[in-house]
Amino acid sequence: MTAPPASQPAHAIAVRVMGVINVTPDSFSDGGRFADPDAALAQARRLIAEGADILDVGGESTRPGAQAVEAAAEARRVVPLIQAIRAESPIPISVDTMKPAVARAAVAAGATLWNDVTALRHASDSLATAAELGCEVVLMHMQGEPGTMQAEPRYDDVAAEVAEFLAARAEAAIAAGVARERIWLDPGVGFGKHRVDHNLPLLAGLDGIVALGFPVLLGVSRKSFISALDVGGRAADQRLGGSIAGALAGAAAGVAAVRVHDVRETVQALRVWRAIAQAGRRSL
Ligand code: HH2
């Protein structure tokens, strides 16, 4: 999976949709809805039927103030679901974890992608574990730690600093033995970023991250900057319009995939956006 060459327009390659399943009691976006194994598997089936290209399974919330989870307990949340999905579908499965032990258990259960919001910085053996597992990895930017990251984020030029960080983490992963073609980058919208002052210029500058030459994953879905821009604050499950606007901005910038809670609506929006862009090219 590689980013489109710079000479190709963004819509030449279909943006893949990663559907989120949080097997947690406390996620900001859908906390508790899929903590039950049967509900989580039903959600996985639903997201596959709705057109998801990848499923991202997470067993620990990253929102500020979320309860920390021991690795063994986190693995007990995600592994049975990954096994159950793998038993009935070949869909690529990603595990959203910062812990090498959980990534290891998830890959053994059938996951093929390690989505790490700490860009393999959480544990001293994160880089080596990613190299050993040989799976794809998502390296995400975050300023600070999940618990305190929103306290006082600071940047001079957020898009440039995030791109510089991601390039350095990709080099670190490659130096540790992770194959270049297995690396994805993610700007980490909402992770140690002021809702409007940082997330908006970051989204406006996504092309600089795409230009690094790795596939880019973008997670905008239901994030709080959407409610900051909306008429009246809206709860996480009332941010679909803004989530889709963010996904389309990512598509226009050339991201490879978007991480979303609302798969059906996002697939529809991306298909329409792409068809219009392609029709425009044909009529040139
Ligand atoms: N956002 C969240 C969690 N994991 N991973 C990547 N790569 N990119 C993201 O933007 C991203 C992520 C936060 O969303 P959610 O999973 O819905 O919430 P929580 O962390 O509270 O479970």
Image (tube, grey):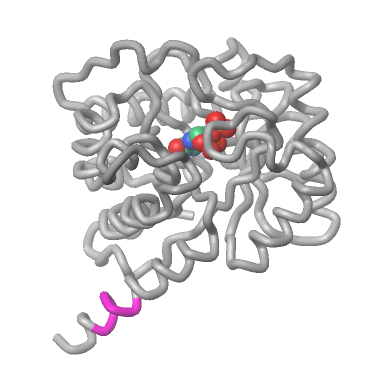
Vertical order, 236 against 48 (above or below): above
* Residue 13 appearing in the image: yes
Q: Quadrant of residue 10?
A: bottom left
Q: Residue at x 73, y 22 (%)?
A: 101
Q: Quadrant of the C terminus?
A: bottom left
Q: Residue at x 53, y 23 (%)?
A: 120
Q: Is residue 109 left or right of residue 187?
A: right
Position of residue 218 measured from the top left corner of the image (x, y, whole percent)? 40, 45
Q: How many marks?
A: 0
In the image, farthest residue toward the front: 232
Position of residue 282 measured from the top left corner of the image (x, y, whole percent)? 23, 87
Vertical order, 133 against 148 (above or below): below
Q: Quadrant of residue 53?
A: bottom right
Vertical order, 235 against 160 (above or below): below
Position of residue 281 measured from the top left corner of the image (x, y, whole percent)? 21, 81
Please name whichever residue, 237 or 147, is drawn nearer the observer in this view of the structure: 237
* Residue 178 appearing in the image: no
| Residue 278, magenta (yes or no) | yes
| Residue 142, magenta (yes or no) | no
Q: Which residues are magenta?
A: 275-279
Q: Is residue 252 left or right of residue 40?
A: left
Overall secondary structure of the magenta stretch?
helix
Q: Is residue 98 left or right of residue 248?
A: right
Position of residue 220 measured from the top left corner of the image (x, y, whole percent)? 40, 44
Please name whichever residue, 162 or 224, is drawn nearer the observer in this view of the structure: 224
Q: Residue at x 27, y 59 (%)?
A: 252
Please name whichever residue, 131 or 123, is drawn nearer the observer in this view of the structure: 123
Please name whichever residue, 261 or 155, is drawn nearer the observer in this view of the structure: 261
Vertical order, 125 against 2 (above or below): above
Q: Residue at x 50, y 46 (%)?
A: 237
